[in-house]
Image (cartoon, rainbow, N blue to C red):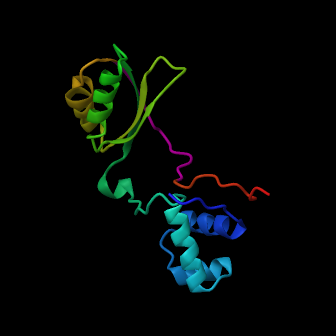
Amino acid sequence: MATLTLDKIDLHILRIMQEYGKLSNQELAELVGLSASPCSRRVKALEEAGYIAGYATLLSPEHFNLTLTAYVQVRLDKHSSDILDDFESQITGYDEVQECCLLTGSDADYQLKVLVSDMAHYKVFLLDKLTSIDHVAGVRSSFVLKQVKNQTRIPLPHRTAQ
């Protein structure tokens, strides 16, 4: 991975790309005040340096009847690296799991964000998948009533380091 010092134009490119991911290079170049070739070279450099991790199309869960989101805290009965690795390996195989985080400062070991169509599908996920994983000792589920904010962009610095 190449090293790259970000300047204000690079940050501007990244902000625009996060907000409007489907822009053509020409449209992006116009928005940042560059011609197409230098803009394209900067985007390529940002990709090579690892600032741009990849590209994705975000789908609307509602159009697929995925309207129930649960945050699930999972407690394991043991904490060896083999047990943690096994849990993580199995949980990453479930499409319903949108996020999985190993936690500290909580009674839970992991927190999952789970997306399903309804409570019946959540029950199948919970009983047939999650609690069938070895060493799962406890599960606590909370269901989203209203999503107030959901964004994929990350906060970027407003200024570059001098």
Q: How many marks?
A: 0
Is residue 32 toward the left or the right of residue 104 in the image?
Answer: right
Occupied quadrant, residue 140: top left
Query: Magenta residues, as a range?
Result: 138-151
Residue at the (37%, 54%) spot, across then down: 62
Give coordinates of residue 50: x percent, y percent: 51, 58
Q: Nearer the viewer, residue 70 or 41?
A: 41
Give coordinates of residue 54: x percent, y percent: 44, 60
Is residue 159 toward the left or the right of residue 4 in the image?
Answer: right
Occupied quadrant, residue 121: top left
18, above or below 86, in the image: below
Q: Nearer the viewer, residue 57 or 12?
A: 12
Task: Single out the residue that lies furthest toward the right.
Answer: 162
Residue at the (51%, 76%) spot, across then down: 23
Give coordinates of residue 131: x percent, y percent: 26, 23
Occupied quadrant, residue 94: top left
Q: Quadrant of the C terminus?
A: bottom right
Residue at the (24%, 21%) spot, across then down: 134
Residue 37 sits inside the magenta stretch: no
Is residue 28 toward the left or the right of residue 86 in the image?
Answer: right
Residue 150 sits inside the magenta stretch: yes
Q: Nearer the viewer, residue 27 or 114?
A: 27
Is residue 65 toward the left or the right of residue 52 in the image?
Answer: left
101, above or below 64, in the image: above
Residue at the (33%, 48%) spot, across then down: 66
Give coordinates of residue 76: x percent, y percent: 35, 18
Task: Single out the residue that lies furthest toward the front.
Answer: 2
74, above or below 67, in the image: above
